[in-house]
């Protein structure tokens, strides 16, 4: 089993829809979870950074971690065309060492006006 | 802040040629990372530096790849000789410390013919 798995999509939704993006991971010891957004021909940019289980909210974005299921989610409320991008989950493999950051392959999202 | 700056943005060259990719990290960031992104494999860490010292190069695919960081504001990734399978987008990222998020440049799109 791969350490991080993510459905590549593509995912197409109408403007205003709630979007749910998900990743699963293999090692229950992982503690730091991130979501990056990548626009076409740009580098990934950090959206959300969570530690351990629970929810974290930032505007229209909510990151959720379920450690018992080894499942992380990113929810986007009231989605906008400007949210169209590829979303990558990332997990810190070790404790505090950024060199052990592993990425999912990304889910391509398209929000139609 | 100017962000992470990579050059060139695009590089097209013939198989067997030497390729040099360049990166200027964000001023004050102690960590620098080189990644490669392809459709098949996603975003993969190649090597990372802490305070200009290479810490982990286990992701470097083979001896044809080398990376240097002669000072805190400059790093290079070199491929010699290049092969068509090296075609990918190469990203550089930097972070303030091991527990801080990574900031990515906009990448170098490399095509080896």
Image: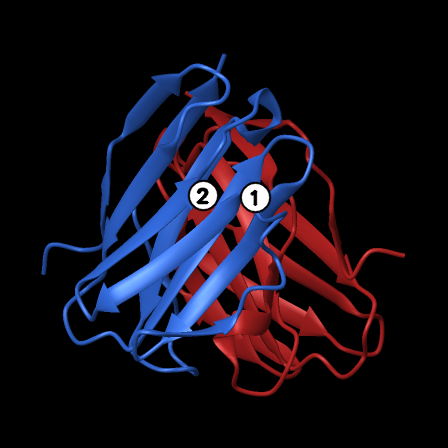
Chain colours: A red, B blue
Q: Which residue is mark 1?
A: A18
Q: Which residue is mark 2?
A: A78
Label 2: chain? A
Label 1: chain? A
What is the residue that sits farthest to the left in this orientation?
B1
Q: Earlier in the sequence, mark 2 or mark 1?
A: 1
Classify residue B67 by image quadrant. Answer: bottom left
> Is residue A55 shown above or below B62?
below
| Left or right: A104 as drawn, with respect to B3 | right
Q: At 50% from the left edge and 12% from the top edge, which residue is drawn?
A: B113
Regarding residue B19, the answer to whether it shows in the image is yes
Regarding residue A60, the answer to whether it shows in the image is no
> Is residue A91 shown above or below B108?
below
Task: Provide residue B27's location: percent of width, then percent of height.
Answer: 14, 69
Task: Provide residue A27's location: percent of width, then percent of height.
Answer: 81, 74
Q: At 77% from the left edge and 78% from the top edge, which residue is drawn?
A: A67
Q: Residues within 10 Å of mark 2 (few under 14, many from 20)?
A: some
| Tags 2 and 1 touching, CB below 8 Å | yes
| Left or right: A55 as drawn, with respect to B104 | right
> Is residue A85 shown above or below B51?
above
Return the residue nearer the eye: B91 or A39.
Answer: B91
The secondary element bearing badge 2 is classed as: loop
Return the residue nearer the eye: B12 or B17.
Answer: B17
- Distance Cα–Cα, label 2 vs label 1: 6 Å
The secondary element bearing badge 1 is classed as: loop
Task: Provide residue B5's location: percent of width, then percent of height.
Answer: 20, 48
Task: Provide residue B26's location: percent of width, then percent of height.
Answer: 19, 64
């Amino acid at each position: 089993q791969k350490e991080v798995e993510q459905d590549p999509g593509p995912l197409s939704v109408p403007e205003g829809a709630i979007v749910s993006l998900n990743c699963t991971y293999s090692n229950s010891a992982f503690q730091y979870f991130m979501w990056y957004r990548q626009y076409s021909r740009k580098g990934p940019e950090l959206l959300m950074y969570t530690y351990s289980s629970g929810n974290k909210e930032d505007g229209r974005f909510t990151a959720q971690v379920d450690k018992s299921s080894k499942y992380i989610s990113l929810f986007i409320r009231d989605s906008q065309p400007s949210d169209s991008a590829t979303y990558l989950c990332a997990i810190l493999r070790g404790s505090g060492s950024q060199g052990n950051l592993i990425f999912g392959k990304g889910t391509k999202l398209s929000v139609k006006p | 802040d100017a962000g992470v700056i990579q050059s060139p943005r695009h590089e097209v060259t013939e198989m067997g040629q030497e390729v040099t990719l360049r990166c200027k990290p964000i001023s004050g960031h102690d960590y620098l990372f080189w990644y490669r992104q392809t459709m098949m494999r996603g975003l993969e860490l190649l090597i990372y530096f802490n305070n200009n010292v290479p810490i982990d190069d286990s992701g470097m695919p083979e001896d044809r790849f080398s990376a240097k960081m002669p000072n805190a504001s400059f790093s290079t990734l070199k491929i010699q000789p290049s092969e068509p399978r090296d075609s990918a987008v190469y990203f550089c990222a930097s972070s303030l410390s091991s527990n801080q998020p990574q900031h990515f440049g906009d990448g170098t799109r490399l095509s080896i013919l």
